[in-house]
Amino acid sequence: MAQIFGTPFIGRENDLARLTGVLERASAGDPRAVLLAGDAGVGKTRTLTEVAAHAAATGMTVLTGHCVDLGDVGLPYLPFTEILGAAAGDDRLAPAFAAHPAVDRLMDTASRTGGASDPGNHLQLYEGITGLLADLADLTPLLLVLEDLHWADQSSRDLLRFLLSRGILQRPSPGRPPRRLAVFASYRADDLHRRHPLRPLLAELIRLPSVERMELRPMADADVAQLVHALHTGPVSDSTVRRIIERAEGNAFYAEELLAALPGHDTPDSFAVPGGLGGLGSLADVLLIRIEQLSETAQQVLRTAAVAGRRVGHDLLRDAVQLPDEELESALREAVGHQLLRPDDNATYSFRHALTREAVYADLLPGERVRLHGLFARLLAEGGRSAESAAERAHHSRESHDLADALAASLEAADHAQRVGAPAAELRHLETALELWAAVDEPDRPATGGTITLALRASAAAARAGEPHRAVQLTRSALARAGEDTDSELAARVRYTLAGNLMRVDSLTDAFTYSSEALALIPAEPPSYTWVWAAATHVMAARYVGREEEAEQVARQALEIAELLHLADAQADLLISLVGMEAHNRRSAKGRDRLRRARELARTAGNRPVEVRALFNLAIGCYESGDLDEALTWIGDGLDRARHAGLLSSPYALELRYLQSLLLYTLGRWDECAQAAAVGAELLPVAGGFANGPALYVALARGEHDAAVAGARALLDQPFDWMSTLVASVVLTDAAALQGDAEESVRRTRASVEALTDASESELPDVVVRLAALTLAAVADAAEESRLSGDTSAAEHWTATARELVELARSTAARGEDGTRQGPEGQAWLSRAEAEGVRAATGPDVDAWHRAVTAFGYGDPYELARCRRRLAEALLNADRREEAAEQAAAARDTAVRLGAVPLREAVDTLVRRGRLTGTSAIGDRITALTARESDVLRLLGRGRTNRQIGEELFISGKTASVHVSNILAKLGATSRTEAVAIAYRERLIEPESTASA
């Protein structure tokens, strides 16, 4: 396993953990075998290399044998010859070879004769190798790796069958030590056609109790993206990364080849299937070799299917190839048997891998391609085809150069996507239509209102699909198309739509400019639909730039006109905005009553986006008021409505998902929060990454510092997004504070305040109170350390910094984003900030921390526990030890329940240092154990034997036994099991955390 890789090991952590777990069992004397399956290029060799490196690092001897594709003329026992040859070169293993001199002769004879022809020689050879490997495993824990088992010759397969079924995995005879041995064998799942000779062997082996099959599945999209960035020395555009992800489909080799095929300029369409990159080594050639092994008829079917796309229905394929049914079925059976096509539900066939289809398609002659695309377009245009086929027809018409039909079909496909709630697909079809428009003669264009209307529709689809920056670009293109002769209402509509999209990307000043222009283009009288919606947009834009009076005046005027025109959804939108400007805002019962009325108006009008906006405001109003359970109810309603309307990627739906995740975090339902993020990661648009942000809070609180920081930085790598910046700011500020880096935490807070505050008259965002409180924890630590060390200058510096941060928190909490005093959460963070400020100035204060504990009692167990830890510290300093012990115990119980490792460790340190009442026995016992005994006790808790403890701590087994005896005596235990039970009960050791992060 000498292969060296220059890129980090990505996306296989769970697979690696499973394999290393097998190694641990094998090293402990439980011999195991794993049959590792996976498609070519998915990462089997890389994973085995990492496992082998781990095995070697833990003291195992790794021996590797490779099977080679030599066609029908295989070399007998090739992988085992390689394994035994490597073992023979290891001086440590010489005693075992000396005891089995016949093995060399037998292997040599078998190789020369093409396998031992005499059955007796077979058995003698197999038993000899079994005995040798068993003796090798006595000398050292052993890992055997066999790669590419799909190419193994018959002799190698027979020997492997014997070794796993009757040989090295069997229990040793009485008196013999357990065999410390593992066998990992890989094979390509996609090469195993129905008659492949390895198939029956695998079926036989996986029934053995000591053998398990493990499938290496394709990498997740996020892992492929990480791989691309790790492999490429320069920047790669998001569109290129997405294209590679789509085409590689989780296959690491394919991703690398696609990336290598990029030309100097990086555009999403600038590469095709790599070919000509070194003959048979190129990806295209490797794929085509498998196709060329089929009959000519099967190849014809594959070529036709490749033009249809990744998937094709049986009836459509039959009509296109025009073969007799029996010939078609025979050809399809051949392609399926060679695992090039696979039958799917609903009488369809799909290529096993997209790049196989691309390789076949790229090999077609240009005329052949055009002809087949035209044929499919005609077939799809015939009566009886489903509405979904419009997208396929548009593609085939375009490729066959029938642009007029491609334009018509693209618009049909967009209509269908809109009806089924698929905004991303609608956007794609509309953008295609915009591209085709100029290439189609005017008489052949459909009557859709022109490119301005088309661009506006595309921008709306982009917004619903969670692509706000693309929505802005499309609306700007509509504005560029709108000349002086454009109808004033359409011109106004373009501008207020652009304003709405600009607000979603936090370009607030520009949004106000365009909403003002929209209102100026059309008069309020006579009343009109366009003016009402222009006004509704302007109200929000004016509020964002601090023009509250203007916003309220326009809102009330527009509400009267909306009522006059019976525009229920516009009434709802304006009511929501007005609630935010009134004393009875969304935190009050009266304000939420008005929001419920707005929700009903929007629902009646069938305007789902406005209804979701109302539900979001209801949810966040409850959250800000501390009514967390009611907030979850409104969130559920909002997400349900968004889901049914295909709006889950729209702005307010993303805000609802974030709020849901935040509530799960706040309520201490951390596993649910992490699980929701894992599911949502595959569904969220790039711009919606912030919605899973609270899962990063969970990871950080559980001690997964690097993962949390990496996730936060990934949010900042995207185009500026206010919510993403907020989430990243919280994570990075708290991460620096937890690391004790006060300077970095202060720098992060200041930078975050600057980034989150628009260059307008708007107030500081509410989150500033939280950022200040998090930073004050590190600042107070630095101030206390400076005082203890006698560094007066540093202490004064940190005390002054603390005063500045406390004042920032106070001013923000007193007048939040909506100009009113913050709710329970904001007041809780303010209490914590003030308590940390006192600590920075004079040390822990009991009353200040009591106030913080009380404030967080509204429903945030983690922050409540963090405050209790500080309160315990203050009580200890005041010599109120019993109360301190009570607070510490409560904080520790919460930390253990949540899996908050850093907090639990901080509480344990406080308990040991203070020898708190009720927990002094714990401190005494920990102190009574030496550092080495504590290490031994930890390994005892993991079930290690004395020998294993010795190996892990680099001491002899006898010394480990002495330590175990001392531990039993100190704990008053009569057995190892009892000692471990006492250790867990008294919290001398902790169970291994299995919580998901």
Image (cartoon, grey):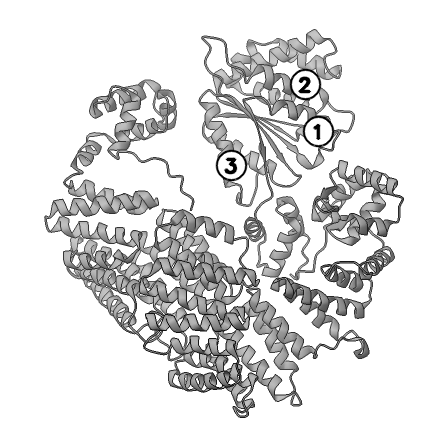
> 10 Å neighbourhood of mark 1: few (<14), some, or many (≥20)?
many
Confirm whether residue 716 shows in the render: no
Which residue was labeled with disc 2? 158
Q: Residue at x 54, y 92 (%)?
A: 523
Residue 555 is left or right of residue 463, and the answer is left
Residues tagged 3 and 2 counted as in contact (Cβ below 8 A): no
Is 412 situated left or right of 750 in this image? right
Pick the front one: 699 or 81: 699
**747 or 529: nearer the eye?**
529
Secondary structure at numbered mark 1: helix
Spatial separation of the CA atoms under disc 3 and disc 1: 24 Å
Badge number at residue 151: 1
Q: Which mark is residue 16?
A: 3
Examine the rendered structure and indicate whether residue 179 appears above or below residue 568: above
Mark 1 and mark 2: Cα distance apart in space: 13 Å
Identify the residue shown where x is 72% and y is 17%.
Answer: 111
List x then y, in percent, for residue 409. 75, 66
Q: Secondary structure at mark 3?
A: helix
- Vertical placement of residue 957 versus 731, above or below: above
